């Protein structure tokens, strides 16, 4: 890869195997709801060491059906860190619940046990009915789920891990062994995004994993219109079962409100092909992050995210922290980098600062999230990059920042 090529902050890697996998579906009788979807879900569950994996249209849909499957609704409150994509909070609103924003560590962007405690205490003092917490693994680095689970379980809270950045990561399980993110050793469900900039891609797609068979069944139900065709679960068997005990060929029941959040066979075939490359993608990302870390080690003005001492990250993003004088200062740097062929992004604007949530709950101050937002900048990270590209990026960022 030449330094003359524009380097976005992230992008997918597609090879001939991926193209062949999708082509096979295109020439098959069924483009959706068939064997490729079932095969992908089985493979994903095996990869994450979970009981079940449920594919869906995207990570946002995954968060939505997780809320539905857990029975969260009006009158409930869900704790979400403010440094995350909008969907983490919006999923609670989709089901009529409300959001409590939790602060994050200003050096990692992550929710911590202590900050979760503070959010719970504040919410309890306001007599809010807290039902669940959505810890978010940011940039591929992991929340300490042991701490989060201990606190959440003591408060009888449900736990949904937002792992849209963290496929391929590993965290310590209750036996102190490393277990894949998605095993749900510390949670009720884990949600993944397989958008093109993520570690692997389905084109557009998402997956929810769980260790609870009832939750898995509910997830499958609500992602497909709340509709069932299994005669053993019919609520009106006289309408759907013939005299020989067989379901009528045409019969189905809508047993709950649901949505069309299915992922097509095309998406799932691509996802399964990409899943076979997950380890190599994660290994390459870890190598690239280590090289970036070395390049920035002696620079006091450009600092990588602080590293936690638990788990094994998979690194979706490479985020640096810079003491910008203002938003204009950061914008000037981003524009200057783009002119040099380097794409950057800001992850994220704190969700509690969005006009919708300020109109809903009023303005609040979360020091860690707001400090992190003022400093963060994501620079290119994806498997096709070479160390020479990273040298170019780091040198250019440092040079422009010192002007």
Image (spheres, grey):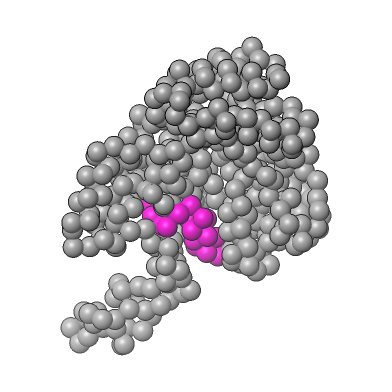
342 to the left or right of 36: right
State the residue in front, 47 or 393.
393
Q: Which quarter shows the N terminus? A: top left
Residue depicted at 64% across the width and 18% down the height? 399
- Left or right: 189 in relation to 308: left
Q: Residue at x 63, y 39 (%)?
A: 346
In x, y percent, where is residue 317? 53, 34
Q: Position of residue 240 (x, y in %)?
A: 29, 83
Instruction: Look at the image and tell me whether residue 149 can be seen.
Output: no
Asked if the magenta segment contains residue 68, the reply would be yes
Q: Is residue 1 left or right of residue 78?
A: left
Q: Position of residue 378 (x, y in %)?
A: 58, 33
Q: Is residue 122 above or below residue 104?
A: below
58 lies above or below 232 = above
| Residue 251 visible to the viewer | yes
Report the magenta residues as a range: 50-71
* Residue under the image location 39 percent in, 29 percent down: 384
Residue 261 is one of the magenta-drawn residues: no
Choose top left, top right, bottom left or bottom right for residue 231: bottom left
Q: Residue at x 63, y 63 (%)?
A: 93
**Which of 214 and 347 lies nearest the eye of the viewer?**
347
């Amino acid at each position: 890869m030449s330094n003359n090529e524009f380097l976005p902050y992230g992008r997918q890697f597609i090879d001939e195997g991926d193209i062949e996998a999708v082509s096979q579906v295109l020439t098959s009788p069924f483009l959706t709801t068939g064997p490729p979807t079932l095969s992908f879900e089985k493979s994903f569950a095996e990869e994450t060491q979970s009981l079940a994996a449920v594919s869906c249209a995207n990570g946002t849909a995954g968060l939505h059906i997780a809320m539905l499957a857990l029975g969260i609704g009006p009158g409930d409150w869900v704790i979400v860190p403010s440094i995350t994509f909008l969907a983490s909070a919006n999923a609670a609103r989709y089901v009529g619940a409300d959001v409590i924003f939790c602060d994050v560590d200003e050096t990692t962007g992550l929710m911590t046990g202590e900050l979760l405690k503070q959010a719970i205490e504040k919410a309890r003092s306001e007599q809010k009915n807290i039902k669940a917490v959505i810890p978010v693994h940011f940039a591929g680095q992991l929340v300490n789920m042991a701490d989060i689970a201990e606190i959440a379980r003591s408060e009888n809270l449900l736990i949904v891990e937002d792992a849209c950045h963290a496929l391929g990561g590993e965290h310590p399980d209750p036996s102190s062994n490393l277990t894949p993110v998605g095993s749900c050793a510390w949670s009720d469900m884990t949600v993944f995004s397989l958008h093109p900039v993520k570690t692997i891609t389905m084109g557009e797609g998402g997956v929810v994993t769980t260790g609870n068979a009832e939750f898995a069944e509910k997830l499958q139900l609500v992602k497909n219109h709340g509709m069932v065709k299994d005669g053993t679960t019919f609520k009106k068997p006289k309408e759907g079962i013939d005299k020989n005990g067989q379901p009528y060929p045409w019969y189905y029941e809508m047993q709950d409100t649901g949505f069309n959040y299915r992922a097509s066979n095309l998406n799932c075939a691509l996802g399964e092909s990409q899943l076979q490359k997950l380890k190599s993608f994660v290994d390459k990302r870890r190598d690239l992050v280590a090289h970036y870390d070395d390049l920035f080690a002696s620079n006091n003005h450009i600092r990588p995210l602080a590293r936690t001492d638990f788990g094994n990250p998979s690194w979706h993003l490479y985020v640096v922290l810079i003491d910008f004088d203002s938003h204009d200062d950061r914008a000037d740097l981003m524009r200057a980098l783009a002119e040099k062929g380097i794409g950057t992004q800001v992850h994220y604007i704190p969700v509690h600062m969005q006009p919708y949530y300020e109109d809903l709950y009023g303005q609040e101050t979360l020091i860690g999230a707001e400090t992190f937002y003022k400093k963060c900048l994501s620079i290119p990270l994806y498997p096709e990059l070479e160390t020479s590209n990273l040298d170019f990026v780091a040198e250019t960022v440092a040079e422009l920042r010192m002007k």
